[in-house]
Amino acid sequence: MDLSTPIEKIPRIGPAYQKRLKRLGIKTVENLIYHFPHRYDDFSNLIPIAKAEIGGPFCFQGEILEVKNIRTFRKRMILTRAVLGDETGKLTVIWFNQPYLVTTFRKGDYVCLAGKIVKKESSIYLSNPAYEKIPAGLSQNSELTHTGRLIPVYPETEGLSSRWLRFIVKPILQKLKNQLLDPLPETIIKERNFPPLREAIWQIHFPDSLEEAKEAKKRFAFEELFILSLFIFRERLKLAREKAIAIPINLDLIKEFVESLPFKLTDAQKKSAWQILKDLAKSRPMNRLLEGDVGSGKTVVAAMAALNVAKAGYQVVFMAPTEILAKQHYKTINDILKKFNLNIGLITGKENYYKGPEGQAYGAGKKISRRELLEKLKNDELDILIGTHALIQEGIKFKKLVFVIVDEQHRFGVEQRARLCQPIRDRGGTGQGQSLIPHLLSMTATPIPRTLSLTIYGDLDLSIIDELPKGRKKIVTKIIRPKNKKETYDFIRQQVKEGRQVFVICPRIEPRTTVACGTGQASQQTLSWMEVKAVKEEYEKLSKNIFPDLKVAMLHGKMKTEEKEKVMKSFKNRKIDILVSTSVVEVGVDIPNATVMLIEGSEKFGLAQLHQFRGRVGRSEYQSYCFLFTDTPGIAVSRRLRALISCENGFELAEKDLQIRGPGDFFGQRQWGIPDLAMASLTDTFLVAQAREEAKKILEKDPELKKYPLLKEKVEKFRERIHLE
Ligand code: ADP
Ligand code: MG
């Protein structure tokens, strides 16, 4: 057995467990021993029974004097009741709903039990303790696994307990730990005073003290951040060596474009556009992220760059995560580039559109077949092609693709983006048959806290639109307690009477177990079904009881694309007054006539996400409102929600969110594929800076990591996990 051994080959792990482990992303021995505990139970306080008092946790060692199951009639529960005895006395022990324990223990077994002593009614007992039989010849408590020491508690998934993980991991570690080779260079270990791998890996699972666990954790956090930094620096070096077609900035064209707009660009838009245009003018591929709050006007900026490229005689693609968004972009881009006589196409799984220069056939834009569209692509009659995933399907070949724009980039996988950014051969011109990589612009409305963007992008290729267009009215944000619901509904009815429209967001359904590690696919499925249920209930309530006179519709992730599309279309065309939806659908859709955003169970969302919901209203001259419904108006909740009222800047909110909830929560669902520990350490600016510094230092001397094969391997493996550009 070594690190690469697949879990299938580990004795004692049957098919059912293999499946569950895979749900946690664990496929090999290496994954298994790198699945770290997220906390420890301190069961090291071993005392004689005579010294027991209410509270704990305490740990007792003694003999099982009796054990039996008792059925409680009132609560229909099975209790396993045992009596533990040592030299000093006897203690009642009760386990709930684990009837099999009666066969686990025999009278006379010598055991170690750890848990809390409670007093209920008149009885005092050890409640639901962790247990283990004491092996013959035990010389030290540190040889125990589940009791008598600091006990690791792991991120779990259904049917996979920490107890089971300990049982599997411990023997593997005992066997392997002395063969493990440390990927961290020795100099770093010495200089930074980190424990070496062999020691650290044991201490993070089965620590002698919390202090040692902390040291080990820090070491692994550093390791992950270090590898992340190496990966990012190396990617950047690689990209810097690649070639792309340089598109000079056509100043007259840009000026004409800016003057043709019905509004004045904000300074932040101008600055971002300029950064992008300058990147495009270089002969190495751009890789830039354009970040800006919902409604900050990213599309115009992208359109300006697209215009510059298209007019230079090259092709641009613009990929969006949903059909609704792709169509919206098709419309917007056609609108704002109208006077520039370009060929613009839309490709989605369902329908395709095409618009040629004004005044000619197709000038007004029309629906065409996929075949016709591909024909146009082949005949060089497409300057800008907008679309969904359909863009990366077989048979779609670009000849002169130079610029790729990806909207809501986090909704796509690395693979999908990579497929769009395939190198093209330069036919004559610049580089004589050389491979040329398209320039890539990714856009996102998720404001990334500075700490994170510093780690990921080093602030180099990041454009930020941090101001909203002038004249936007401030959105009135209010926290609504249950007792004020009615008047809020009355207010909403009034808004609808005045012709406005309303979004209602249903509460996010949370996984029952709060684990640091995501919930795995199976439960993710159940979760989304639970969300659907929540939406349906809310829809019933609103359409039948509260607004029977208004047109209410719903939208959720389990609906067919066409259905969703139909609903969105009706909403856009004002045939629906109130749209009830889950939190997951259709970010970025532009409905200027909607002025109310009502969020049920608002305390379940992060600040950054609430801020994004709020950004869907306030896009017109009408005053807009955001109502945060909450049933649990605790002080902490209020403080969090109040931050939303006082703060309108998405970046500030993201930073606050990061501080309050931690990065794991902030990014939910492992959006970026960054390892948990690295993620959790991103708030440790000092450690982050150290890791970056060391990574830089090592790459300066040895850019190919020739002297560090182990490290190189780790960095390369990292590529498979990470979702960054
Ligand atoms: P997002 O950044 O969320 O993608 P959009 O690009 O969809 O935002 O822009 C939101 C709305 O703001 C659009 O209707 C757009 O026409 C408008 N808009 C963009 N820039 C400006 C500006 N500088 N002044 C006024 N309105 C603008
Ligand atoms: Mg957008």
Image (cartoon, helix red, strand yellow):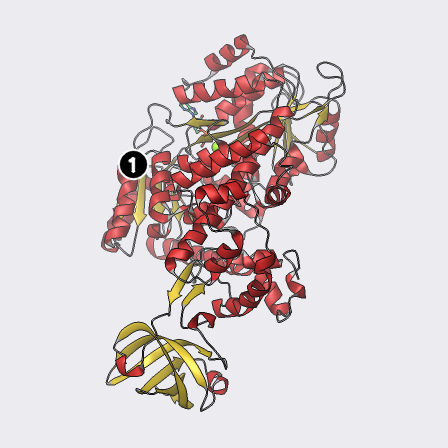
Q: Residue at x 41, y 58 (%)?
A: 537
Q: Quadrant of ligand 1?
A: top left
Question: Can see residue 581?
Answer: no
Q: Residue at x 43, y 48 (%)?
A: 680
Instruction: Classify mark 1: helix, strand or loop.
Output: loop
Q: Quadrant of the C terminus?
A: top right
Q: Is residue 328 above or below residue 548?
A: above
In which quadrant of the rendered view does residue 345 lie? Answer: top right
Q: Is residue 441 above or below residue 47?
A: above
How many numbered discs, if any? 1
Specify few, some or many for label 1: CA neighbours under 10 Å numbering under 14, 14-19, or 20 or more: few
Q: Residue furthest top?
A: 252
481 or 145: nearer the viewer? 145
Q: Quadrant of the N terminus?
A: bottom right
645 or 51: nearer the viewer? 51
Residue at disc 1, CB closer than 8 Å to ligand 1: no
Residue indicated by mark 1: 647
110 or 421: nearer the viewer? 110
Pinpoint residue 437: horizontal percent, then vertical percent: 66, 26
Q: Is residue 130 above or below residue 636?
A: below
Pinpoint residue 61: horizontal percent, then vertical percent: 38, 81
Pinpoint residue 719: horizontal percent, then vertical percent: 60, 42
Question: Can see residue 51?
Answer: yes
Q: Residue at x 39, y 84 (%)?
A: 62
Q: Residue at x 37, y 39 (%)?
A: 654
Pinpoint residue 283: horizontal percent, then vertical percent: 62, 18
Kind of residue indicated by mark 1: Cys
In which quadrant of the rendered view does residue 707 lie? Answer: top right
Q: Is residue 309 left or right of residue 62?
A: right
